[in-house]
């Protein structure tokens, strides 16, 4: 037996230029959505409406926006300069003067986190942008030419997706550090 419930209003709204099968008059008349004056939403509007209704997504977006603004205005928010050293205040715990405490050289950890966040966000955004550009380029070539070029590009993509990236990073860092035997790195890097 079919479910006779009505779909949610946001999911009933067709994209621009599309009409749901219920709204189309097979006699050649004008669709009911146009006659009734209902607003037809674009795909972007549908996505934004769905995003706004997802509480966890909105909370994450607000937190990410606040962190981005904090790192952008780090010079205004941070109570100390990035490289200011106070040896007398080294290794202090969190306090009203140093919110996250201090490191071995007495530098304020909160200030260093704010300035370090700039680099982290820049790296993350640049990686996302470059991945989108490369993926769009490869997808466009595969879609335009199709056939054997599409198959080759998709197999290369599958190869990259099948190898765990963390393992590649560990192996490449081990090879690039000059350590050839497992015991030779630990003795030199942890002094």
Image (tube, helix red, strand yellow):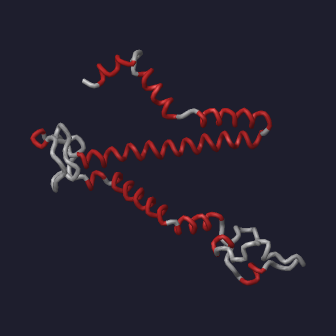
**Percent x, y of residue 82:** 24, 43
**151 left or right of 168?**
right
In the image, is residue 114 above or below residue 2?
above
Please identify the quarter of the rendering in which residue 33 is found: bottom right
Residue at x 77%, y 80% (from the top left corner): 32
Quarter that holds the C terminus? top left
* Residue that sits furthest to the bottom in the current view: 36
**113 left or right of 31?**
left
**Number of numbered discs overlaid on the protein picture:** 0
Residue at x 34%, y 51% (from the top left corner): 71
Residue at x 69%, y 34% (from the top left corner): 155
**Percent x, y of residue 90:** 14, 41
**Percent x, y of residue 128:** 52, 45
Please identify the quarter of the rendering in which residue 143 is found: top right
* Residue that sits furthest to the right in the current view: 27
* Residue that sits furthest to the front in the current view: 1
Quarter that holds the N terminus? bottom right
Pick the front one: 50 or 78: 50
Residue at x 35%, y 52% (from the top left corner): 72
Pick the front one: 187 or 139: 187
**12 left or right of 173?**
right
In the image, is residue 128 above or below residue 28?
above
In the image, is residue 76 above or below residue 165?
below
* Residue that sits furthest to the left in the current view: 88
**Percent x, y of residue 65:** 41, 58
């Amino acid at each position: 037996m079919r479910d006779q419930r009505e779909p949610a209003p946001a999911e009933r709204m067709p994209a621009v230029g599309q009409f749901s099968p219920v709204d189309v008059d097979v006699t050649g008349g004008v669709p009911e959505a146009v006659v009734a004056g209902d607003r037809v939403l674009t795909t972007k509007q549908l996505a934004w409406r769905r995003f706004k209704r997802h509480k966890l997504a909105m909370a994450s977006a607000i937190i990410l926006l606040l962190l981005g603004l904090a790192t952008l205005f780090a010079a205004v928010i941070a109570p100390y300069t990035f490289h200011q050293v106070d040896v007398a205040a080294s290794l202090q715990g969190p306090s009203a003067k140093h919110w996250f405490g201090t490191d071995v050289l007495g530098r304020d950890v909160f200030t260093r986190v704010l300035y370090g966040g700039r680099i982290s966000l820049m790296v993350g955004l640049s990686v996302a942008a470059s991945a989108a550009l490369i993926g769009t380029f490869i997808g466009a070539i595969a879609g335009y030419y199709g056939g054997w070029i599409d198959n080759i590009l998709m197999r290369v993509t599958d190869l990259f997706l099948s190898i765990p990236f963390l393992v590649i990073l560990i192996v490449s860092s081990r090879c690039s550090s000059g350590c050839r035997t497992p015991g030779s790195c630990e003795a030199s890097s942890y002094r």
